[in-house]
Image (tube, rainbow, N blue to C red):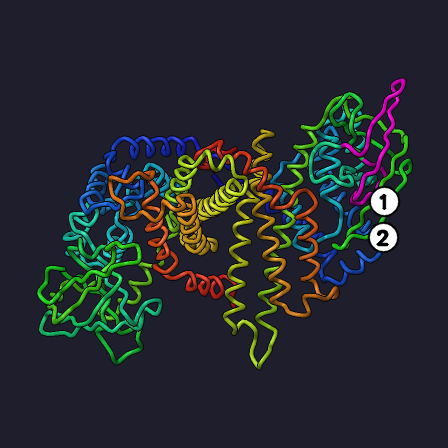
Amino acid sequence: MQLALSAEDEAFRAEMREFFTTQVPDDIRAAVIEGRELSKEQIAGSMKVLDEHDLAAPHWPEEWGGRGWSDLRRHIYLDEMQAAGCPVPLAFNTSMIGPVLAQFGSQEQKERFLAKTRNCEIWWSQGFSEPDAGSDLASLRTTAVKDGDDWVVNGQKTWTTLGQYGDWIFTLVRTNPEVKKQAGISMLLIDMTSPGLEVRPIELIDGGHEVNEVWFEDVRVPGENLVGEEGQGWTIAKFLLGNERVGVAPVGAIKRHLARLKELNGERIGAEPRLAARVAELENELLALELTALRVVAHSSEGEPHPASSVLKLKGTVLQQAVSELGVDLAGPASLASGAGDGTALPDWTPHTAPTYLNLRKASIYGGSNEVQRQIIARTILGL
Amino acid sequence: MDFTYDDEQESLRDAVRGLLGKAYSDFEQRRQTTKEDPGFSEKTWRQMAEMGLLGLPFSEDDGGVGAGPVEIGIVCQEIGRVIAPEPYLPVVVLAGGLVQACGTPEQRAEVLGGIASGEQVVAFAHDEPGSRWAPAASGVTASESDGSWTLTGTKEPVVAGERADALVVTAALPGGGTGAFLVQGADAERTGYATYDGGRAARVVLDGTAATPLGEPGTDLTASIGTVLDIGRIMAGNIALGAMQTALRSTTEYLKSRKQFGVTLNTFQALTFRSADMYISLELASSMVQWATMVIESGDADAVRVAAARCGVQVSRSSRHIGQEAIQLHGGIGMTAEYSVGSYTAVLTMLDHLLGDGDHHVDVLAAGVLDHGSLDPLAMA
C-alpha cells in the first residue's frame, strides 16, 4: 500500500501537464473549459497536435504509434488532458476502430487506415445502434449481401454521433440471417461518400445537432473492407466495447467542471451552507470515484480487469450528470437564456448550463446504459 | 500508488481471519457471546493479545509491535467481517492511541504494555451527555490541589466502561482546554448496560475522583484528542468495510438460495439491481477507507482530519445504504436476532454514530470547500 506516485510517474505527470497546458491551442482549451460546442476543425486540430507528439493513441500497439505505458500512466495522461481542457481524442478513432483494426484488421487495412485514424485525417463514425437495436445490439437488421467481391448494404443506423463530420463508418451488418443472431453479424468499413449512403440529422433536446441517422440503400462496399472474418462482428463489437479499463469515467473533466462552478459562484457557496454541503458532498463522491479508478489502474496484474472497473461507468455518468445539474441550479433563472447570444446581459457561463444538463442525460444511456451496467455487476461480479 | 497488500500484510490478514473466523465461525457464537457480560470473549481477547494484535500500533519500547495504520486497518476489517464484539477500537485505537500520543514514557510502558498483553482493558471515556463528537470536554472538569488531581462530572456512553480496569478520561482543565487523565476503574462509579449492537457501555460518574494527568499536567491536549478521534474514524471505517462486505455477501447468497413463487429470488431484476447498487456503495467505501488509512501514515494532522471526514462521509452513506438494503432484500428473516444480517446493520449503525455521522463530516468538508479548486488524490498525503 502506497499513496504517492513514484518519482518517475511524478515526473511523467509534470511532463503531461506541461504539454497539455502549453502545446494545445488556447482557443480550443477555452471552448472546452467554457462548455462551448467544438467545431470539427478544433477536434481534429487538437488530435493532430497530439499525434505530432505521439500522444494521440498511446494505448495502441507500439508498432502503430502506441507508447507501451502502464495503465496508471494512461490514467495520468487522460487526467491531465482533461484538467487542461484539451479535447479527448475522438473515441471512434482512438478507442474504437483503431484498436479493432490493430487486433483484427488485415495488414492492408492497418497500413491504409491506422496512421490517418490516429491523426484524425480520417474521421470515423460508429454504425452500431439501430432503431430496434439499442441495448439489445445483437438484434440489428441492417443487411449486407455478397455480390461478386462486393457487399451490398441496406438498412438504417441511428444515434451516429457527429456523423455529419464522418469520412468513414465502421458498421455492424447482418451477413447471415440463418444462424444465431450474434453469429450472423460482420463488421464492414464503409466510405461515407459511397452512393446510396445518406446522413440525416436528429435534433436533440438541447437544441443541438450531435447525432444522426445513417441510411444505406444498395451501398456497395468492396470485399476488402470486411474486418476480420465473416461472422466475427459480434466478437469484434464486444472487444471494442469491453477492452477499456482506463478512462472509463471522465473524472478529470467532471472535476474541472465542478471546480469552475465553484470559482464562478464562490460568494454564494460561501454564504449558503446548504449549497456548500451539496458541493462538498459531490466533491467527495468524485474523490471516491477517482480513487476507485486509481485502484483499477494501479492493479498491477495484466489481463484480468479489476472487478471495481464496472463501477466506473455507472458512477461516472451519475456524477457527470449531477455536476451539470448543479450548474443549472447555480445559474437559476439565467439558465433560461440558452439562445441569448453574445449581447446577453447575463453572466456568460449561464446560458450553456441547461443545454449541457439536458445533453448529458445521454451519458447514462450510451455505451451500455446504466441498467445494462447493473446487469453486468449483478451477473458477473455478484453471480446473481 | 499501490492499493495492494505486501506479503507480510497478507499473512497478518490470514492470521487474524483464522483467529476471528474460528471464534465466530457461525453467527450463533457471536450471539451467545454478546448475551453474557462483558459482551465479548475474554478468551478471544487473550488470543488477540497473544497474536500481538492488541499491541500492534504501539512501539516496541512500550510493549507493542510498532506496526502502521495499514496493519491496524487489516485487523479492523477482519473484526468487521465477523462483527467480532471485542472492544479493539475503543481500547487499542482510542484509549491506547491517546496514551501513546500524550503519555509519559512511564505511562506508555505501563498502560500500553497492559493493553498489549491483554492484562488491562482500558476504556476511552470521552462522550458526555450533550456532546456530539467534538474533541473538547466540558461536562467533566479537572481540579488540582497540591499536585493531586481529581475529576468531577459524568461520562456517558463509555464503551466497555464497566469491564475496564482503567479509564482514559478527558476533562476540562482549570486553566482552559481539555486534558486527559488515567482513572482506575474501581475508583469511578460505573453503571453498565447493553447497547443495541451487542456491545456494552456504561455511565461513569466521577465525584472528586482521583486521577493521574496523562503527560505533562495541565497541558491542553485538544489537538491530540482530535487526531486520535480522526484515526479512530478511519479505523471505524475499516471495521464498517469488513461488515459491509459480509452484509452484501450474505444478501447475494440469500438471493441465490431463497425460493418464492417457485423460483430463487435472484430471478427478480428488482432485487439484483439493488444488489448491484450495494456493490457500488461498497467499492466506493473501500476506495475511501484504503486511501484514508494510507493518509494516516503521512503523520500530517490536518491531512488526517480531512481524510477522516472524507472517509466518514462515504462510509456513512454506504453503510446506511448497504445495511438497510441487506435487511430489505432478505425480508422478514433479516429482522430476527437469530439471523446474522440484521446485527450487521446494527453494528454499522453503531459505528456511524460512534465518532461522527455523515452529516457531521459533510459540515467539516463544507467549511473548507472553497479552499481548493479540484481535489487531487495523487497529491493528498
Q: Position of residue B22 (x, y in %)?
A: 72, 57
Q: Which residues are magenta?
A: B138-167
Q: Which element is circle 2 on?
A: loop
Asked whether residue B345 is drawn in magenta, I would say no
Taking depth in this image into account, of A258 and B252 the one nearest to the observer is A258
Q: Label 2 to label 1, Cα distance in Å?
A: 10 Å
Q: Chain of mark 1?
A: B
Q: Residues within 10 Å of mark 2 (few under 14, many from 20)?
A: some
Which residue corresponds to mark 2?
B37
User: What chain does mark 2 sit on?
Assistant: B
- As helix, strand or loop, the secondary structure at mark 1 comes to loop
Q: How packed is label 1: few (under 14 Cα within 10 Å), some, or many (20 or more)?
A: many
Residue occupying image coordinates x 28% and y 37%: A30
Q: Viewed as shown, does residue B152 lie left or right of A171? A: right
Whether residue B138 can be seen here: yes
In the image, farthest residue toward the top: B146
- Reading the image, the residue beneath label 1 is B162
